Amino acid sequence: MMSHRHNWPARPDEGHRMRMTIGDLARAAAPPGWSRLTVRRSQVGAHALTTLICDGREVAAEGVDEQFQRLRELSYRADAGTWFTCELEFTAGSRGYTGHVDSSAPPFADVPAPAALAELTLFPHEEPPGWLLAALPTAAPIALPTAYGDRRHRRHRHSDHEPPPPPPAPITGELAYRPATAMTAHVFEHHQEPDLHDVYLTGQADEPECLLVGCSANALWASRGGTRGTGGGMRSITLDGEVLRLELTPEAADALETETAFEVRLDMPPEMTARLAAVLPGMLRRVTGAPELIGF
């Protein structure tokens, strides 16, 4: 039997990854006991301002500016430019975020002329907003030398034998990432080779949800649905009656697109649950760095 542990989709959305990194940097800057973080970036050209508000009070965070700059580049569209304002909100106890981006409203009351010129030089587009044109020194320059726009166009050319690049990150509208917290499994399967174990927990035929936990003597991995999966990062696995609970590191949770606590409701025949309870300890006991097993 062939293992499925390498059947991950193509590369993930780098824009989402940047937003997750911004969240981690904001959490690291927040004082203990925080409940809500709001990070706002306003930028035209090199004229930029980043604010981090933690429960109504402004705090300083390091490394956030570079992430937002890269996110602006990833968001660039030749016909519409990139966003001028990005706001992200994070809540305690969750890996998710909400927010919005805006590519039309002015991010500042006064936009310096050099910043407006730099914006159209770095991110040229067909119909710049009126306030951006009005901020130019005289009039919109013709045939501005371009920087990022031309580089992105050349870099994203690909042959017919390569997958197309992912679409650019959004420049206008709402942003939201809501990690999964639970799934319901109706079927348990165990596949074994001489040095390989795979455990599958799946839904009904019309439910695409699936959790795979696999291991060899020196490696442990997991995947969920169409996510790329994680090579480890499972802190513990708890069997509590008809619930299987995974405690994950933040990195593993992000790879699986879940919260750090993820539950599998075992809606299956009792004999199938009993077999799962017997198989998991046996396959994980010999793995270096195996998660703690509770309730087995």
Image: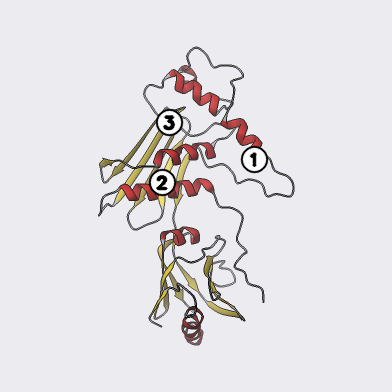
Please tell me the numbered disc located at residue 156. 1
Q: Mark number for residue 16?
A: none
Residue in view at x 68 percent, y 40 percent: 157
Q: Is mark 3 on a helix, strand or loop?
A: strand
Pick whichever, 129 or 70, lies toward us.
70
Q: In this view, does 217 lie above or below 168?
A: below
Q: In this figure, which residue is indicated by the disc labeled 3?
A: 43
For the residues marked 1 and 2, what is the alpha-carbon distance in whole angstroms?
25 Å
Residue type at mark 3: give it: Gln
CA separation in Å, label 3 and label 1: 25 Å
Residue behind mark 2: 22
Q: How crowded is mark 1: few (under 14 residues within 10 Å), some or many (20 or more)?
A: few
First-in-chain label (3 vs 2):
2
> Which mark sits nearer the N-terminus, 3 or 1?
3
Question: Residue 6: image x %, image y %?
Answer: 61, 65
Residue located at (60% from left, 17% from top): 142
Q: What amino acid does circle 1 point to?
A: His
Residue 129 locus on image (x, y percent): 50, 24
Q: What residue type is labelled 2?
A: Ile
Relative side of 44 to 39, left or right: right
